[in-house]
Amino acid sequence: MTFHPKWLILAVVVGLYLPIAIDATVLHIAVPTLSNELQANMSELLWIIDIYPLLMAGLILVMGALGDRIGYRKLMLIGSIIFGIASAFAAFAPNAEILILARALLALGASMILPGTLACLRYTFVDEKERNFALGMWVMAGSAGAAFGPLVGGLLLEYFFWGSVFLINLPIILVVIVSILYLIPKQQPIAKNPLNLMDAAILISSILFVIYSLKSGLRDFEIYHLLLGFIGVVLGIVFTRKQINSSYPLFDIKLFASDSVKFGFMISVVAMIALVGFELLISQKLQYVYQYSPLQAGLYIFPFMISVSVGALVSSPLLNKFGPKKVAVVSLLLSAISMYFLSNISLNSTYLNVVFWMILLGLSILCAFLAATSAILSGAPIEQAASAGAIEGMSYELGTGLGVTIFGLLASYFYMKNIDFKQYLTSEQFDIAKSSIGETYQIMSEIKPENVEQVIASANSAFVMSHESVLVVSAWILFILSIVIGFFWKEKK
């Protein structure tokens, strides 16, 4: 491939996407620090982490539609400015509530950037093989950013204050804004249709109602949790019907009639759930059970991060040779096998054994991502590139948010099943400690000194068993998805 300005554009796109992806997971390893520094309870901590990907999942569709109207250059530029302002706002948040608000503002900026970057690649790289290479770099930036988020967070927390995890975005954003202005050509508005912001509000409400009911209902079930979940599902159905019947839909839901778009979306969501969930739980296990520092925990899973980062070098040629369906099926099967064997390995065992399965998991997950991204963009007409990019971005962010939620719920369920310390705590203490190992550690100072050792031993044992069970469930989900895709995805000849 000869040099062309489009490769500089690719560098700008990758540079812009990287901090967006890092911010999705950079706080996973910072839960104990944020709890201490901001005096945040567990519910607030979960929303600090989850509000970013979940709001992005809801906003990204309307931003994709906006990109089709104003052009991807303006979309990327406006999003970058908002993301930079929000980063500074988040870095100096005085409490959990302000940090949640800042993370929501970050989601607004990121939801503009993400579909804009994909649309930019779709227009810039007309040749399919070159586009697959460019998409490989894009997927690598996203996957590597998400994978390296914990290590970046751990490194910064080791030497700087917690807000530094957001301040590192600022120099990157400044360079990218200048690059967009000078390198990326202007576009004429593509569509004149009005934006339907009400539909975006319905979608966001649906996602947040369902997630809130799941998180709160498992901890302390009340009938209104069930009601809120039901309202969320109904709103989701209303959103879908409105998209089908509207003259000016938020995005063309008919794109999902294509097997490539439909199964690509499904793969991306499930693969991201697996990646984020694996990272979140192993980071907690290393810090709580094995008493690693945030930096040590990040370094432990470094081979996994590296494999995700270099996976594009493997996945792009495979995709060009075998096509997205075959790559997706094999990748999901290998991911399932890796998850299963990681569930049966003690982290005190031979480190090389753990490294092998982490590397295989990272490579296979990245290949699944690239297959999904290529399928979604190739399955949509070029004039709907931003909408297709929004669908891909929504799948990525929805998977990130659901990964935190689903793995958290499963871990909490298996943790509660395996704990054996009720006799050492008062009823009030047990109500707080029973849901997660983090909350168990929060009440350690209130426990009688002679009971602390037994409670810690029980909590650690329960979390280890919980971690193993969640990985087995994940392995089965990935395996079943690979079988479904193999049988039902009909590729166009």
Image (spheres, helix red, strand yellow):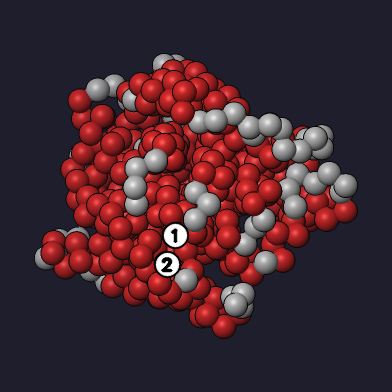
Find residue 444 and report its horizontal and vertical position in percent.
30, 39
Foreground of the two, 447 or 228: 228
- Where 339 sits versus 410, above or below? below
Looking at the image, residue 298 sits to the left or right of residue 234; the answer is: left
Find residue 43 and report its horizontal and vertical position in percent.
51, 38
Q: Decide if residue 298 is in sight here.
A: yes
- Looking at the rendered structure, the kind of residue marked 1 is Lys
Work out which residue is located at the far front of the displayed protein and give it.
2
Foreground of the two, 383 or 351: 383
Looking at the image, residue 240 sits to the left or right of residue 172; the answer is: right
What residue is at 21 percent from the left and 39 percent from the top? 295
Q: Are marks 2 and 1 in contact (CB under 8 Å)?
A: yes
- Characterize the local packing of mark 2: few (<14), some (14-19) or many (20 or more) Cα atoms within 10 angstroms: some
Looking at the image, residue 319 sits to the left or right of residue 69; the answer is: left
What residue is at 88 percent from the left and 53 percent from the top? 245
- Looking at the rendered structure, the kind of residue marked 2 is Asn
Find residue 233 and report its horizontal and vertical position in percent.
74, 54
Q: Which mark is residue 408?
A: none
- Characterize the local packing of mark 1: few (<14), some (14-19) or many (20 or more) Cα atoms within 10 angstroms: some
Q: Which mark is residue 129?
A: 1
- Where 175 sits versus 375, above or below? above
Q: Quadrant of the C terminus?
A: bottom right
Nearer-N-terminus badge (2/1): 1
Give the labeled residue for mark 2.
Answer: 320
| Residue 150, quarter of the rendered image | top left
Find residue 161 and report its horizontal and vertical position in percent.
29, 21
| Residue 261, quarter of the rendered image | bottom right
What residue is at 23 percent from the left and 34 percent from the top? 155
